Amino acid sequence: MYFVAKTVPKDDGTQRILYDTRKPLKTVLHRINEHFLRRVIYPDYLTGGVPGKDYTDSVKIHVHAESVIKEDISKFYPSVSFDVVYDIWSSFFSFSNEVAELLTMLTTRDGHLEQGAPTSGYLANLALWDIEAPLVAKLASIGVTRYSRHVDDITLSSPDHLSASRVDWVVRTVATALASKSLLVHPGKHEVMHAGRRAIEVLKLVGNTKPSLPSKERSRVRALVHTFCRRVEAGDSGEELERLLPRVRGQAYKVKRFHQRIGEQLVLQVDQAAKLLRDSPSDVGSR
């Protein structure tokens, strides 16, 4: 019933495998979402896969922070086990043991969550349902007053500078909480940032004063748009350029979302190139 829908390259060079489901299981899982998982009122600190939210909401939580700590849950979806999902259905939703076991069997594969399945995003948000709020309160008690989790990316911040010893305590506290669910912190993705020393980046956005794209990312998109437009003007393969157009346009709109003036210029350039591509089908690719 589960099958590999696609693979997506990750920043570390490995591949992220995304699954989907076939009918009738897919229909059942969508009904589980409709009747149970979408009706949950998720805490504000959860921003991934929550209706009406996206990664920018996570960044907004940490605007004007003096110190930021970023952690990543290693192999998150495969590490959310059958037992953790069963506990969600039996303890969070208070279903009987029989119903909870059936729901767990429907929403897991080979004893764990699979990323991409209809119910997996919601269940991933609920995986820490009984430990996350106490963790947030514990961190707030020592000055780490802002917390967000975007799927497997945990960000913590303070309006005050955190000493090295305080950072170490926070890191150990988070790791201990995750370990209670048999989850591990990815050692290679731990990062500490202090305002004034460098730009505060959360989920690949700069969050010092408001969510924005790093200057390197803006430059990359400008170069992408420039190259695309030059290729259209030079009469490169129309078929290839048509395939590239949605991606280039999407990148231009991404810049516009955070930097309106610059983004509008990029969108205009892409639109003009797209018009040239449409109006000169016989010329493009034949010069």
Image (cartoon, rainbow, N blue to C red):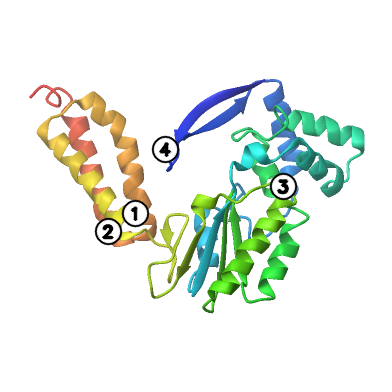
Give how far apart the Cα atoms at labels 2 and 3 are: 40 Å
Give the residue type that dot 1 points to. Val
According to the picture, the residue beneath numbered tag 3 turns out to be 127
Give how far apart the Cα atoms at labels 4 and 2 are: 31 Å
Q: Helix, strand, or loop for circle 1?
A: helix
According to the picture, the residue beneath numbered tag 1 turns out to be 255
Residue at the far bottom in the pictured view:
160
The answer to whether the residues at label 1 and label 4 have Cβ atoms under 8 Å apart is no
Give the residue type that dot 3 points to. Ala
Give the residue type that dot 4 points to. Gly
Give how far apart the Cα atoms at labels 4 and 3 are: 27 Å
Residue 108's x, y, as percent? 72, 31
Give how far apart the Cα atoms at labels 3 and 1 are: 33 Å
Sequence-earlier tag: 4 or 2: 4
Sequence-earlier tag: 3 or 1: 3
Give how far apart the Cα atoms at labels 2 and 1 are: 7 Å
